[in-house]
Image: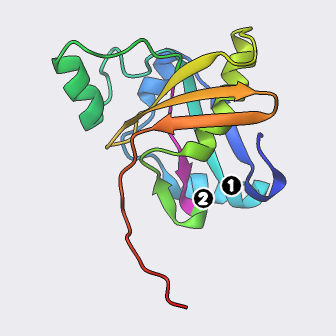
Amino acid sequence: MVGPAHCADLLLLLSQDEFEQLADVPDFAAIAALTSVLGLRGVVPTVEGDGCVRGKRTHRSRLHLALAEAGAVPSLDFTSRFFAPAIGVTEDPVTGSAHALLVCFWRARKGLPLGARLLGYQASARGGLVRVCETDGIVQVEGEATTVIRAELLA
Protein backbone atom coordinates (compact mmCIF):
# COMPACT_ATOMS: atom_id res chain seq x y z
CA MET A 1 0.00 0.00 0.00
CA VAL A 2 1.38 3.37 -0.98
CA GLY A 3 0.41 7.00 -0.57
CA PRO A 4 -0.89 9.18 2.26
CA ALA A 5 -3.38 7.56 4.63
CA HIS A 6 -6.33 9.61 3.32
CA CYS A 7 -5.87 8.29 -0.24
CA ALA A 8 -3.66 5.20 -0.06
CA ASP A 9 -3.70 2.84 -3.03
CA LEU A 10 -2.85 -0.83 -3.39
CA LEU A 11 0.04 -1.09 -5.85
CA LEU A 12 0.11 -4.46 -7.65
CA LEU A 13 3.34 -5.32 -9.44
CA LEU A 14 2.40 -7.74 -12.21
CA SER A 15 4.25 -9.73 -14.85
CA GLN A 16 3.63 -8.95 -18.53
CA ASP A 17 1.30 -11.96 -18.80
CA GLU A 18 -0.63 -11.03 -15.64
CA PHE A 19 -1.04 -7.43 -16.77
CA GLU A 20 -2.35 -8.44 -20.18
CA GLN A 21 -4.73 -10.95 -18.58
CA LEU A 22 -6.50 -8.18 -16.67
CA ALA A 23 -10.00 -8.15 -18.03
CA ASP A 24 -11.06 -5.25 -20.21
CA VAL A 25 -13.84 -4.82 -17.64
CA PRO A 26 -12.57 -6.22 -14.33
CA ASP A 27 -14.77 -7.32 -11.43
CA PHE A 28 -15.47 -3.85 -10.03
CA ALA A 29 -17.63 -5.23 -7.20
CA ALA A 30 -14.70 -7.33 -5.95
CA ILE A 31 -12.30 -4.38 -6.25
CA ALA A 32 -14.75 -2.13 -4.37
CA ALA A 33 -15.15 -4.71 -1.60
CA LEU A 34 -11.38 -5.17 -1.26
CA THR A 35 -10.56 -1.47 -1.15
CA SER A 36 -13.41 -0.77 1.29
CA VAL A 37 -12.25 -3.51 3.68
CA LEU A 38 -8.65 -2.28 3.52
CA GLY A 39 -9.61 1.40 3.76
CA LEU A 40 -7.97 2.23 0.43
CA ARG A 41 -8.83 4.65 -2.34
CA GLY A 42 -8.03 2.35 -5.26
CA VAL A 43 -5.95 -0.35 -6.92
CA VAL A 44 -3.03 0.38 -9.27
CA PRO A 45 -1.83 -2.64 -11.26
CA THR A 46 1.52 -1.92 -12.93
CA VAL A 47 4.10 -3.66 -15.10
CA GLU A 48 7.56 -2.69 -16.25
CA GLY A 49 7.75 -1.46 -19.84
CA ASP A 50 4.88 -1.56 -22.32
CA GLY A 51 2.06 -3.58 -20.79
CA CYS A 52 0.19 -3.59 -24.10
CA VAL A 53 3.07 -4.59 -26.38
CA ARG A 54 1.65 -8.02 -27.18
CA GLY A 55 -1.85 -6.65 -27.75
CA LYS A 56 -3.67 -9.45 -25.91
CA ARG A 57 -6.32 -7.14 -24.47
CA THR A 58 -9.48 -7.09 -26.56
CA HIS A 59 -9.82 -3.33 -26.33
CA ARG A 60 -6.44 -1.59 -26.35
CA SER A 61 -6.65 2.14 -25.77
CA ARG A 62 -7.28 4.46 -28.67
CA LEU A 63 -3.96 6.19 -27.98
CA HIS A 64 -1.92 2.96 -27.97
CA LEU A 65 -3.60 1.74 -31.17
CA ALA A 66 -2.90 5.05 -32.93
CA LEU A 67 0.74 5.08 -31.79
CA ALA A 68 1.23 1.43 -32.82
CA GLU A 69 -0.36 2.05 -36.22
CA ALA A 70 2.02 4.97 -36.79
CA GLY A 71 4.98 2.92 -35.54
CA ALA A 72 5.50 5.56 -32.87
CA VAL A 73 5.01 3.79 -29.53
CA PRO A 74 7.67 5.39 -27.28
CA SER A 75 9.95 3.42 -24.99
CA LEU A 76 7.93 3.15 -21.79
CA ASP A 77 9.35 2.71 -18.29
CA PHE A 78 6.06 1.30 -16.94
CA THR A 79 2.39 0.78 -17.73
CA SER A 80 -0.51 0.98 -15.27
CA ARG A 81 -4.26 1.08 -14.80
CA PHE A 82 -6.29 2.62 -11.96
CA PHE A 83 -9.50 1.28 -10.40
CA ALA A 84 -11.43 2.91 -7.54
CA PRO A 85 -15.05 1.73 -7.80
CA ALA A 86 -15.69 2.14 -4.05
CA ILE A 87 -15.41 5.92 -4.52
CA GLY A 88 -17.31 6.01 -7.81
CA VAL A 89 -14.40 5.67 -10.26
CA THR A 90 -14.58 2.33 -12.05
CA GLU A 91 -11.48 2.97 -14.17
CA ASP A 92 -9.88 6.39 -14.35
CA PRO A 93 -8.55 7.25 -17.83
CA VAL A 94 -5.29 8.84 -16.64
CA THR A 95 -4.48 9.31 -12.95
CA GLY A 96 -1.83 11.90 -12.07
CA SER A 97 -1.85 11.04 -8.36
CA ALA A 98 -1.21 7.36 -9.12
CA HIS A 99 1.71 8.34 -11.36
CA ALA A 100 3.14 10.44 -8.52
CA LEU A 101 3.33 7.21 -6.50
CA LEU A 102 4.46 5.07 -9.43
CA VAL A 103 7.49 7.26 -10.20
CA CYS A 104 8.78 6.76 -6.65
CA PHE A 105 8.27 2.98 -6.89
CA TRP A 106 9.77 2.53 -10.36
CA ARG A 107 12.69 4.93 -9.81
CA ALA A 108 13.72 2.95 -6.72
CA ARG A 109 13.08 -0.46 -8.33
CA LYS A 110 15.20 0.45 -11.37
CA GLY A 111 17.95 1.95 -9.18
CA LEU A 112 17.68 5.33 -10.89
CA PRO A 113 18.89 8.54 -9.21
CA LEU A 114 16.61 11.32 -8.01
CA GLY A 115 15.81 13.55 -10.97
CA ALA A 116 15.53 10.67 -13.44
CA ARG A 117 12.61 11.25 -15.85
CA LEU A 118 10.34 8.27 -16.46
CA LEU A 119 7.60 7.78 -19.02
CA GLY A 120 4.49 5.95 -17.91
CA TYR A 121 1.47 4.82 -19.88
CA GLN A 122 -1.99 4.35 -18.39
CA ALA A 123 -3.76 1.63 -20.37
CA SER A 124 -7.38 2.72 -19.95
CA ALA A 125 -9.84 2.87 -22.86
CA ARG A 126 -8.66 6.43 -23.60
CA GLY A 127 -5.07 5.88 -22.52
CA GLY A 128 -2.47 8.49 -21.70
CA LEU A 129 1.26 9.09 -21.56
CA VAL A 130 2.56 10.68 -18.36
CA ARG A 131 6.10 11.98 -17.85
CA VAL A 132 7.15 11.91 -14.19
CA CYS A 133 10.20 12.98 -12.21
CA GLU A 134 10.94 12.80 -8.47
CA THR A 135 13.42 15.23 -6.91
CA ASP A 136 13.95 15.90 -3.19
CA GLY A 137 10.43 14.94 -2.11
CA ILE A 138 8.74 16.73 -5.00
CA VAL A 139 7.14 14.86 -7.89
CA GLN A 140 6.55 16.52 -11.24
CA VAL A 141 3.76 15.05 -13.37
CA GLU A 142 3.48 16.15 -17.00
CA GLY A 143 1.18 15.12 -19.83
CA GLU A 144 -1.72 16.11 -22.01
CA ALA A 145 -4.98 16.94 -20.23
CA THR A 146 -8.57 16.48 -21.30
CA THR A 147 -11.17 18.89 -19.94
CA VAL A 148 -14.13 16.91 -18.65
CA ILE A 149 -15.92 19.62 -16.65
CA ARG A 150 -15.93 23.37 -17.15
CA ALA A 151 -17.56 25.49 -14.45
CA GLU A 152 -17.64 28.98 -13.04
CA LEU A 153 -17.56 29.70 -9.33
CA LEU A 154 -19.84 32.49 -8.21
CA ALA A 155 -18.98 34.60 -5.18
Q: Residue at x 56, y 44 (%)?
A: 96
Name the element at disc 1. helix
Is 80 magenta? The answer is yes
Q: Quadrant of residue 152?
A: bottom left
The residues colored magenta run: 79-85
Give residue 84's position: percent from left, percent from top: 57, 55
Contact, CB < 8 Å: mark 1 with mark 2? yes
Label 2 packing within 10 angstroms: few (<14), some (14-19), many (20+): many
Q: Quadrant of residue 127?
A: top left
Pointer 1 residue: 35
Q: Is residue 66 above or below residue 77?
A: below
Question: Which quarter of the rendering shows the C terminus?
Answer: bottom right
Give residue 123's position: percent from left, percent from top: 41, 34
Is 12 magenta? The answer is no
- The residue at the far front in this view is 155
Q: Residue at x 32, y 43 (%)?
A: 126
Give residue 8's position: percent from left, percent from top: 75, 49
Pointer 2 residue: 32
Lateral position of residue 139 relative to residue 27, left or right: right
Question: Which quarter of the rendering shows the N terminus?
Answer: top right
